[in-house]
Amino acid sequence: MDLTELKPGEKAVIKNIKADEELKHRLLSMGIQKNSEVALKGYAPGKKVLKIEANHSCIAIRDEEARKIEVFKK
Amino acid sequence: MKKNLTIALVGQPNVGKSMLINAISDAKLKVGNFSGVTVEKKEVEFDFKEYRIKMIDLPGIYSLKDYTIEEKVTKKFLLEEDYDLIINVVDATALEKNFLLTAELMELEKKMIIALNMMDEAHKEGIIIDNDLMSEILNIPCLKISAAKRRGIGKLLNKAIEIAEKPLSKPKLVFSDTVEEEIDNIVNFLKEKGYKSQISYRELAIKLLEEDKDFYNIMREEPVWIELLPIIREALEHLYIHYETKNVEEIFAQERASFVRGVLTETVKYQKSFQETLTDRIDAILIHPVFGIPIFLFFMWLLFQATFELGNYPMELIDLFFASIIDHTKEILGDGLIGSIIADGAIAGVGAVVSFLPNIVILFLGIALLETTGYMARVAFLLDGFFHKFGLHGKSFIPLVTGFGCSVPAYMAARTLKNHTDRLITLFIIGFMSCGARLPIYVLFTGAFFPQEKAGNVLFLIYIAGAVFGLIAAKVLKTFVFKGKDEPFVMEMPKYRLPSLKLLWHTVSTQAWMYLKKAGTFILAASVLVWFASNYPKNPELEKEYAKKMELTENKAEKTALENELKAKLLKESYLGRIGKATEPFFAPLGFDWKLAVALEAGLAAKEVVVSTLGVLYALGETNETSQGLKEQIKKNIPPAAAAAFIVFVMLYLPCFAASAVFTKEAGGVKYLIYLFLMTTASAWTMSFITYHAAKLLI
C-alpha cells in the first residue's frame, strides 16, 4: 500500500520509495526514507495535499508524490 | 589588538539561526549577498573578551548536496572559505531530523560546536537531553541554549574561543561495519601509496563512495586514480548488494539515519509519551479542511484594512508636515526658480512618497508576521491544491504574497521554487500582485472617488482583481508557453513560534529604510526631472501675451481664469507635455489625457513617481490654493470611467525599473524582460480599454 491509503491518524513504516532522484533527495534530506516511521495527520481542503509526520516534524506533500512512497502497517 | 575569530553558522531552516544572531547584543548586522548569487548573506561582528568575532549566517539547508542554490552556497563556503569553526544550530525539539545534517557536517572533519537551541521548548515538551554524554559520543561539544530567551549565549561563545584555540579533535562519525570496511580499504590504499591530500583520507574516501562530483573531478587528475578506481568500484558493488539499491545517496542517508538514531537513543529521553503539542492544536483550527481558507482570507482582509485605516492617521500628519515645509521654503527662497525647484519639485515629490510610509510599514509588518510565526507554510499547504490547478505551486504563494509588499524581494523569494518552469510562471505573474508602491496611487484614487468608509473595501477589491488576473495569466502561460514537469511538493511545516520583537523590528525597519532610501535618491531625482520637464522650455512670448490681456481686465475672476489658462498652455508646451502629447493617441482609447499618460510613463522608473508626477502636474494650476489637496484636484479633473481604467492600467503594467532589473536576473536573460514588457503592456491596455468602456456604460 502507499501513503495515500492510510487513514488520518494511522502510522506506518516506509518500505520503499519509488521516486526520481530529485524527489528522493528531497525526501531523504527530510528524513523520509526506508524503514522510518510516518503518520498521516490529515488533508488540505480538496484532499490534494497531505500533512504527514516523520521524525517529529510535520511535512506537507502532494498526493502524486505520496503515492510513490510504499508503506506497511506495523 | 583584538584577535579575529570567524564562525560559520550552519543549520536547517527554522532552527532559530537569525534569532541567535539577534540575541547577541551590541552586534553590528550586515546584510549582503553571496558573491555571484542573490542568496542573502547575513553577518555580525562584535567584540567578545579579547576577540573580534565575525559570525556568518549561512542559508538554512536540509542537506549538503548540490540540489538547491542554498545548498550549493553553503557547501562552497564550508569547503573553500576561511573560517575558524562551525556552529551547527539544531532545534532540540526535532533532533532526529536536525542531526541528519549534523552527520553530514561531521564528515567535513572541521572544528565544530553543536548548539542545542530552543531548549526552553524542549523542556516544556518533556525532552531530556544528556548533552555531556552526547558531546562524548560525537566528540563535539554540545551546548544547550535558547536564543529566544537569550540563555547560554555567553557559554557558547566561550566554548567557540576554546575550540578555536585548540588543535582539531576529529568528530566521531561511525558508519555500519559494511561501510566502515570499504572506507578502511580506500584509506589503507592511500596510506600505502603515500598520497598527499589537503583533506583527510577518511573524508576523501567517504566523498568518493558518496559519488561526490567535485571530488571525482579533482581525483581524476591524479596518477593514483587508475589504481584507486577498481577499489572504489568493488566497494560500491558490495554496498549495492548489501543495501539492495544502486542509489548511493539513499545508502548514505540510511547510514546517517541509523547513526543518528543510535546516538539519540543513548542521549535523549522523552519524559512524556507522545502528546498533542500546541502546534497540533493551533493547526486543528488554522488548517481545518473547511474553515482554514476562510480564516486565511479573513487575516488577509484584516491586513489590508489595517494598512488603510490605521495608516491613515499618521499619513495626514506627515502630509501637514510637508505642506508646512513647502510654505516655509517658499517664504525663505521666494517664488522664483530656486524656490520652485526645491519646494514644488523636490520637497513635494519626496513628501508625497514619504506620506505613504505608514501604510507600507503596516503591510510589511503583516507579511513579516506571516513568515516568522510559521503561518506562511500553512498557507502554502492550504492553497497548493488550488494553485496547482493554475500551473503554480503552493510555494508560489510566498513570493506572490511578498509581491504585495515589493516586487524586488518577491522575485528573489521565487528562488524557493526549484523547478525552472514553476519559477518562471511565478516570476511572470508577481507583477500583477500590486506592490506597496502602487498602494499610494490606489489610495489617492479610491480616496478621491469613494467615501472614507468604503475606500478600504474598494482597495481590497483592487488587490483581489490583480491576483485573480495573475492566476488566469499563470494558467495561460502554463498551457501555452511553459509546458513541463511540475516540481515535487514536499515542504516542512515548522512549529508555530512567537517571533522576537527584535527580529520583526529588524525586518520591517530594513524594508522601510530601503523604501525611504528610494525616496531620497531615485524618486528625488525623478521628481526634479519631472519638475524640470514640466517647466521648460520657457515660453516668454506666450507669457507676455497673457500679461497684456490681464492688464486690460479689471475683473478678478477673469484674471484668475486667464492665469490658469496660461499655466495650462505653458504646461502643454513643456517637454513633459510634448512627451505626453506624442503618446496620447496610444492612451486615448482608454480615456487618458496627456497628464495621465505622462504619469504612467514616469511610473516606469518607480511607481511612487506616478503620485508625485500627478502632484506636480495638477498643483501647478492651483498654486494659490495650497490647502486644496491632490485628491480634490483628481476628483475635479478626471472622469470616473477614466480613473477606473487608470487604476486597472497601474495594476497590470510593467513593474518599476529596479524590479525589472531583478526580474531579468532571476528569470535568466533580457529576452524574458522583453516578454514581460509585451505581456504586461498588452494585458494592461486591453483590460483598461474594457474597464473604460464598461464604466462609461454604467455611469
Image: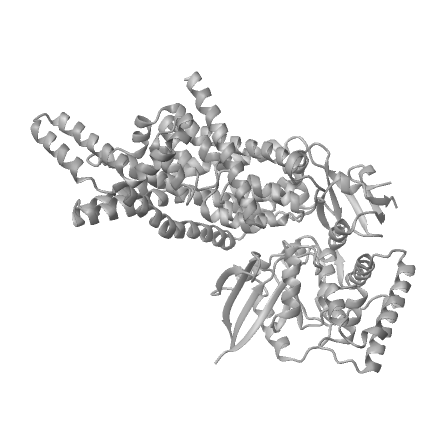
Determine whether B276 is above or below B202 in the image. above
Instruction: Determine whether, in the image, residue B299 is placed left or right of residue B564.
Output: right
Residue in the foreground of this view, choosing between B229 and B251: B229
- Residue B274 lies left or right of residue B470; in this view the side is right
Which of the two residues, B631 or B599, is positioned nearer the viewer here?
B599
Q: Quadrant of the C terminus of chain B?
A: top left
For the question of whether residue B130 can be seen, the reply is no
- Pinpoint residue B273: horizontal percent, then vertical percent: 77, 50
Which residue is at the front of the view, B644 or B664? B664
Total numbered circles: 0
Relative to B597, say whether B220 is above or below: below
Position of residue B677 measured from the top left corner of the image (x, y, whole percent):
51, 40
Q: At 62% across and 63% down in the image, what residue appears?
A: B145
Coloration mode: one colour
- Residue A9 lies in quadrant: top right
Residue B204 as seen in the image, left or right of residue B609: right
Which residue is at a point 90% across and 63% down the rendered structure image? B237
Q: Is residue B59 visible from the viewing direction of this image?
A: yes
Q: Quadrant of residue B476?
A: top right
Residue at figure coordinates x 87%, y 66% from the top left: B233
Vertical order, B494 against B614 (above or below): below
Q: Is residue B245 left or right of residue B81?
A: right
- Residue B152, image x and y in percent? 59, 65
Q: Position of residue B442 (x, y in %)?
A: 42, 34
